[in-house]
Amino acid sequence: IFDRGAEMMQSRMRTRCGGVALAATCCASFLVILIGSGTHSNGNGAFSSPALRGASSSTAWGVIVAPPPSAEPVAAASSDSHPTSLVTGFFAIVACCAAARRRAVLAAAAPTNAIRGSATARQATIMFEPEVDEEEDVDVIGRLTENASMVSKTSVLVLGATGTLGRQVVRQFLNAGYSVRCMVRNRADRPFSFLVDWGAQVIEGNLVRKETLPSALIGVHTVIDCATANPEENTYNVDWEGKKTFIQCCEKMDVQRYVFLSIKDCEKYQSVPLMQIKHLTEKLLAKSSLRYTVIRATGFMQPLVSQYAVSILDDQKVYGDDGTSPGIAYMDSQDCARFIAAAATKERTVGKTITVSGPKVWSTSEVIELCEKLSGRKADISTVPSAVLQLTQIVAGCFEFTIDVAERLRFVDVNSQNAGGKTEVMNRETYDILGVDPDNTRKLEDYIGEYYRRVFKKLTKGKYEPEAGELEK
């Protein structure tokens, strides 16, 4: 911003200097007329000095005027030569004004002085950046979409590919023979080598850096959006402003399918920032020209391993609720990835909002009891009432540096508002729309049981190997 302001000030100063030079030129030319025309004809010749008339005015006034053809001093002109000198002076003024104006225009259009070197071109680009955004960006996107009809239907871009769900989505499409591209935020500090090992293409991009988005969409037929803000990132900037820009870019790039991961019942809890943003994004997709599908998911089984299974096995304290929570139909991220892949490849899912979940609703106390049963250990449970969490959320919201913590604690409102209610699971009709067999979805007891089975085999045998007939997932 400061560079751009400096450029504008310098441009204006050059223009003003050009105007001053033009005015000085006119005055100098007028004096030349007076000198050349012999103003002493009335007897008051104050400017009739032969030395001035014979000197080159290019050095005296800074204006290019040719000296007299004769090298001898010019004699004082009589009153008869006065009209001819006026005509000559008039054309001299016109020529001088044209030359001065041309130099002023060139000075205003030129970049800053050559001493600044390569930085000059960069700042000149910044100076005209608004015009580039409105005109040249559209032209660039237009050139990129010329071959949109040539895009292969098996080309997929996955957002959030390094996350719990995103990596499973990548595997599903790679196993099905698709060409998968993954956009990651930062190659330096985010693990992504496993995606390359699987056969996916990894490119650097960021939803909050709109200049990285068009290139990521070149040759893409389908977008799978599993991305969300990291704990250290601002939810509003990434999940709303970034997604809004990305969706608009997908429209301009003629992306054929867009599958968006949302949250179950997000329209009911508008006091929770992330759920409100998810719902607004659903509305934005509905108003767009994209052929979209919204997948609303419940909680995943994977975080339960670190929250309960590992802690109980290590005799560490686990935290439960006061029993007011209606429970969650936990689902395996691999099953959710299969649902997403099925929705992306079926025409009957276009324009629909589909809610997916696990086969059974589990409360926190039931999850703890399951881990105790499978591990053979007794859990050290510390109950945290919902009122305490709500109070913590209110206190955290009073300080700017803990506002992100407060926003995440707003998920407690989901439990308090739905206390005593009943959580519904995925029905048969949804399975039929996706073309998925409900018997092939994993149950929570099987998932936790497989984890403990692997751990115990590693402790006793030093490594884990599936038994005969056992399917490793």
Image (cartoon, rainbow, N blue to C red):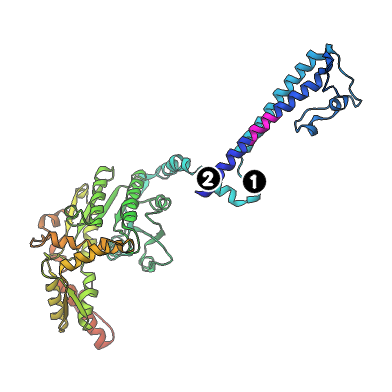
Q: Quadrant of the rendered structure where residue 180 is?
A: bottom left
Q: Quadrant of the rendered structure where residue 445 is?
A: bottom left
The numbered dot on residue 5 is 2
Q: Could one spot residue 458 in this view of the protein?
A: yes
Query: With 444 as the anchor, is 230 left or right in this view?
Result: right
Q: Residue 335, percent across and down? A: 20, 64
Judging depth in this view, the residue of 103 and 212 nearest the camera is 103
The numbered dot on residue 113 is 1
Relative to 17, is 241 above or below? below
Furthest toward the top, the residue is: 80
Q: Main secondary structure of the magenta part?
A: helix
Q: Amino acid at mark 1?
A: Asn
Judging depth in this view, the residue of 19 and 373 nearest the camera is 19
The stretch drawn in magenta includes residue 254: no
Q: Residue at x 21, y 72 (%)?
A: 304
Query: With 193 as the anchor, is 471 left or right in this view?
Result: left
Q: Residue 161, percent across and down? A: 33, 62
User: Which SS class for mark 1?
Assistant: loop
Q: Residue 176, percent across and down? A: 28, 60
The numbered dot on residue 422 is none
Count of labels in the image: 2
Judging depth in this view, the residue of 427 and 43 nearest the camera is 43
Q: Residues within 10 Å of mark 2 (few under 14, many from 20)?
A: few
Q: Residue 348, percent across and down? A: 19, 48
Q: Residues within 10 Å of mark 1 (few under 14, many from 20)?
A: few
Please state the extent of the stretch shown in magenta in the rendering.
17-24
The stretch drawn in magenta includes residue 22: yes
Query: With 187 as the anchor, is 123 left or right in this view?
Result: right
